[in-house]
Amino acid sequence: MAESFPMNGGDGTYSYTNNSQFQKQGFDLAIGMIKEAITEKLDTEITGTFQIVDFGCSVGPNTLFAMENMIEAVKNKCILQGLDSKNMEFQVSFNDHTENDFNTLFASLPLDRQYHAAGVPGSFYRRLFPRASINLAYSSYALQWLSKMPDEVSDRKSMAWNEGKIHYNGSPREVVDAYANQFEKDMGVFISARAEEILSGGLMILIMPGIPESAAHLPYSAGVLFNFLESSLMDLAIEGIIDKAEIDAFNLPIYFPTDEEMRKVIEKNGCFSIEMIEFANPKSPVNGSLDADSWIMHLRAGMDGIFTKYFGYDVTEKMFNKTLSKSEEISHFLQSGHFNSTQLFVVLKRK
């Protein structure tokens, strides 16, 4: 059973709704490639009912923007093929964990939307839809979340015990391998489930943070930002607010795959042709809208749930406040040129 750590719901200060600009920039960077893929690669029949699914939709507004753009791309493909899109009906299914704030998501649906909307709760690390029912599958900034923390990294008897750390960034090779193995298992399950659900000729478009094979797991990756949360937790342990053993038992279930790791899982499954695997760098937060304080808010919107589950609300609040006090250090890191956030863009076609 996959663990559930939904993004912060609602529309408050720490909500994902108000702190997901970086993910939006990632979609903006990929929108041209998405439209091109739909125009050139989509081979399902585009008449009648056309189903699009966002796996890991969260609460918006990014998923709503993405769905509207994809529908427009499908309609434009109809025009190019001389088809009348007026006879089409679009079904958009929004998927996320059962604990996701679907109420906020559906409250923000535009009244003039050009699709029927449905929520499909449940982990995407299993089957969720009938066989051959999806024309276009999409997932953005969700698949970096593993189904669970790798067991070995919190086991004192394991060579992969990740003592004093909350992520594999800067950890021994055994820890990195434990994360990589968990990613391979999870992605294998995800690809297999989607292979049953997507129509022949249908597309799956994936956007997620990744790392080129040539720079795999180097310490200047985006994972370095987790080190600031880690150091704040260790500060609390030194102050006696939490026990260090609690930190030793906790690891973020987040992994940034390489292009070759993705290719390996896809080819092992054998049900999809790889139409595109490319890297791009989302807009730098230094030159964009995300300064150090905004980055911390961004992390909190996505990780409040998991930290609160393991450490409780009070410790989580203190941890993020500690991290805010390190804004100057974080700003120096972001501006040093060592920050490297790389986005992996994947287009797959169901054979």
Image (spheres, helix red, strand yellow):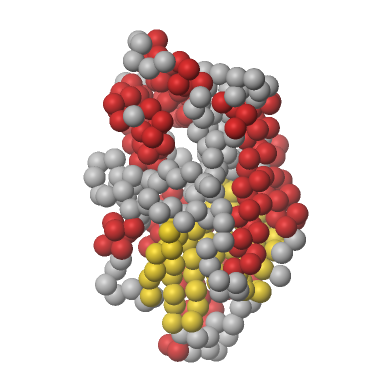
Residue 216 position, x and y percent, is 66, 35
| Residue 170 in sight from this viewpoint | no
In depth, the one of 192 and 279 nearer the eye is 192
Residue 56 position, x and y percent, is 46, 54
- What residue is at 38 percent from the left and 75 percent from the top? 116
In depth, the one of 276 and 118 nearer the eye is 118
- What residue is at 61 percent from the left and 60 percent from the top? 193
Seen in the image, is 312 located left or right of residue 182? Answer: left
Q: Quadrant of residue 65?
A: bottom left
Q: Quadrant of residue 220?
A: top right
Location of the C terminus (image quadrant): bottom right
Residue 44 position, x and y percent, is 61, 78
In depth, the one of 275 and 109 nearer the eye is 109
- What residue is at 66 percent from the left and 46 percent from the top? 185
- What residue is at 66 percent from the left and 38 percent from the top? 180
| Residue 96 in sight from this viewpoint | yes
Whether residue 239 is situated above or below residue 294 in the rendered picture:
above
Residue 278 position, x and y percent, is 63, 52
In depth, the one of 113 and 236 nearer the eye is 236
Disc count in the image?
0
Whether residue 82 is situated above or below residue 288 in the rendered picture:
below
